[in-house]
Image (tube, rainbow, N blue to C red):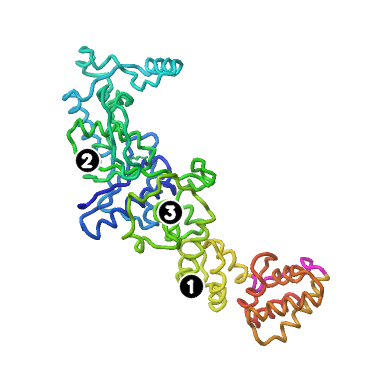
């Protein structure tokens, strides 16, 4: 082994979603591991913005903000593909001059017609232009042509992919694809190869939707006598039901996870559990697994996005945050300044509620009622006559209680419901409502512990005023 250089090369034609983050993470991880031995290993970021019609600044920002949020840190300046377009064109010229590529004047209509004919005849023929390459007149044209790669008819290509293993494709099955369009702009297929070569990329780690492209790109490398990087095509991520990743499954902007109360470390940890690293214990950091990480151990089957597991992991990370970190996150990211409220109450509420909140938003929603319900005047009609009688009795009982502990409160509440011959909710709902303003949610014993005896009685008394 020697030092390695990888790149994450998204097109800014869509938001950075969790599937692409997984690709970026594997690139980053591979380099991070290599750096232990080879300090000059590098993880680079290239924005593939040559498709000007589909590229948008908001997507560019989504990529940058998402990677920064997750601490998937790239090195060097961001490489902007469109700035390098002249080099791509020059390389296409070289390929033309060396007869590794040829000029083509076929129109879209002509090619579509041929394609339709082959489909009808059930022929799997990829090469649609068969005449231009050997036509001297066309090859002497000065304008109005596109440039296609010249691919031999015989032989095959074998790619030894570090995840997929050896994959062989016959040359006859490879299209003589376009590298320079009629308007002389380079295509993705060419630009990727030229840039990867220029950036010294040693390992191309990307989604396996690009595996077919690798064979075409292989031909470009070969024709230019360039060293071919190692290919690593990782299986894509699917929705929980096995379908393509959709918005519902999390194909939205990765920053939405932050907005919905997920922590960056939870997202990274969760992604690591998806076919990248397997262990009995599902909670681990990048640093703790780095020495065991191997590209060859990446799962060959698609991974599935699953909120349940993500929530489980997020809960674990929230549990282990200290209260100050939570208060800072609330303030910086969730527009909620908890320091405006009683510090004691906040601390007690966080100590208890952080153990049962899947997301920071959920934690905020659980805490807010405690904080804002203090002086809330409630409408007596919210609570039935029977409940008011029960509440008064319950108040008298807890008033006498000096050991204000969870188990004790649970016990006396249970005794109360037994003695009164009522269902738990008959006292649970009204007590919750008058203490926190919400009739459902947190267990009564937790509410009473968070509020403390004095505050609990004050809030109950307030209700009866
Ligand atoms: N720009 C391509 C994409 O966003 C990736 C190209 C590559 O990694 O080679 O799918």
Q: Nearer the viewer, residue 80 or 228?
A: 228
In the drawing, does residue 458 fall left or right of residue 275? right
Q: CA distance from mark 3 to mark 2?
A: 29 Å
Question: Residue, x 56% and y 62% (percent of image)?
Answer: 362
Kindly state the secondary structure of the residue where label 1 is placed: helix
Q: Which residues are magenta?
A: 373-384
> From the viewer's perspective, is 416 left or right of 264?
right
- From this viewpoint, is residue 388 visible? yes
The residue that appears at 63% across and 81% down in the rendered structure is 405
Q: Is residue 399 above or below residue 199?
A: below
Q: Which residue is mark 3?
A: 271
Q: Position of residue 241 (x, y in %)?
A: 54, 44
* Residue 323 numbered mark, or none: 1
Q: Quadrant of residue 152?
A: top left
The answer to whether 179 is drawn above or below residue 6 in the figure is above
Q: Dividing the image into four quarters, tell me where ligand 1 lies.
A: top left
Q: Main secondary structure of the magenta part?
A: loop
Tell me if residue 275 comes above or below residue 145 in the rendering: below
Q: Residues within 10 Å of mark 3 (few under 14, many from 20)?
A: many
Q: Position of residue 66 (x, y in %)?
A: 40, 52
Q: Nearer the viewer, mark 3 or mark 1?
A: 3
- Residue at point 39%, 62% (across, down): 285
Q: Is residue 347 magenta?
A: no
């Amino acid at each position: 082994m020697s030092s390695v250089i990888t790149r994450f090369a998204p097109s800014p034609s869509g938001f950075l979603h969790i599937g692409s983050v997984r690709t970026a993470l594997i690139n980053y991880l591979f380099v991070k591991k290599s750096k232990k031995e080879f300090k000059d290993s590098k993880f680079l970021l290239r924005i593939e913005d040559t498709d000007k019609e589909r590229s948008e600044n908001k997507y560019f920002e989504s990529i940058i903000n998402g990677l920064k949020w997750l601490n998937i840190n790239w090195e060097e300046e961001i490489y902007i593909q469109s700035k390098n377009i002249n080099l791509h064109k020059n390389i296409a010229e070289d390929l033309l001059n060396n007869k590794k590529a040829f000029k083509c004047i076929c129109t879209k209509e002509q090619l579509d017609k041929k394609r339709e004919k082959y489909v009808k005849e059930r022929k799997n023929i990829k090469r649609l232009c068969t005449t231009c390459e050997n036509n001297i007149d066309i090859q002497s044209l000065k304008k109005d042509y596109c440039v296609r790669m010249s691919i031999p008819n015989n032989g095959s290509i074998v790619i030894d992919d570090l995840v997929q293993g050896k994959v062989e494709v016959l040359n006859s099955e490879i299209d003589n694809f376009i590298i320079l369009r009629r308007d002389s702009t380079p295509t993705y297929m060419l630009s990727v190869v030229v840039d990867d070569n220029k950036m010294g990329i040693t390992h191309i780690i990307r989604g396996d939707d690009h595996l077919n492209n690798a064979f075409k790109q292989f031909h470009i490398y070969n024709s230019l006598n360039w060293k071919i990087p190692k290919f690593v095509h990782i299986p894509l991520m699917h929705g929980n039901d096995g379908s393509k990743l959709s918005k519902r499954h999390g194909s939205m902007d990765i920053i939405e996870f932050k907005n919905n109360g997920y922590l960056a470390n939870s997202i990274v940890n969760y992604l690591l559990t998806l076919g990248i690293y397997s262990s009995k214990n599902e909670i681990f950091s990048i640093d703790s697994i780095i020495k065991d990480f191997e590209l060859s151990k990446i799962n060959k089957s698609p991974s599935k996005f699953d909120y349940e597991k993500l929530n489980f992991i997020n809960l674990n990370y929230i549990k282990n945050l200290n209260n100050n970190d939570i208060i800072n996150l609330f303030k910086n990211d969730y527009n909620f300044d908890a320091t405006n409220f009683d510090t004691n109450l906040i601390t007690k509420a966080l100590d208890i509620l952080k153990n049962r909140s899947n997301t920071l938003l959920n934690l905020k929603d659980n805490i807010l009622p405690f904080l804002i319900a203090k002086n809330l005047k409630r409408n007596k009609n919210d609570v039935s006559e029977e409940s008011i009688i029960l509440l008064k009795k319950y108040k008298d009982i807890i008033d006498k209680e000096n050991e204000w502990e969870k188990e004790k409160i649970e016990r006396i509440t249970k005794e109360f419901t037994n003695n009164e011959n009522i269902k738990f909710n008959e006292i649970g709902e009204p007590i919750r409502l008058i203490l926190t303003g919400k009739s459902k949610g947190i267990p009564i014993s937790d509410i009473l512990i968070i509020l403390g005896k004095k505050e609990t009685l004050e809030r109950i008394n307030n209700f009866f005023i």
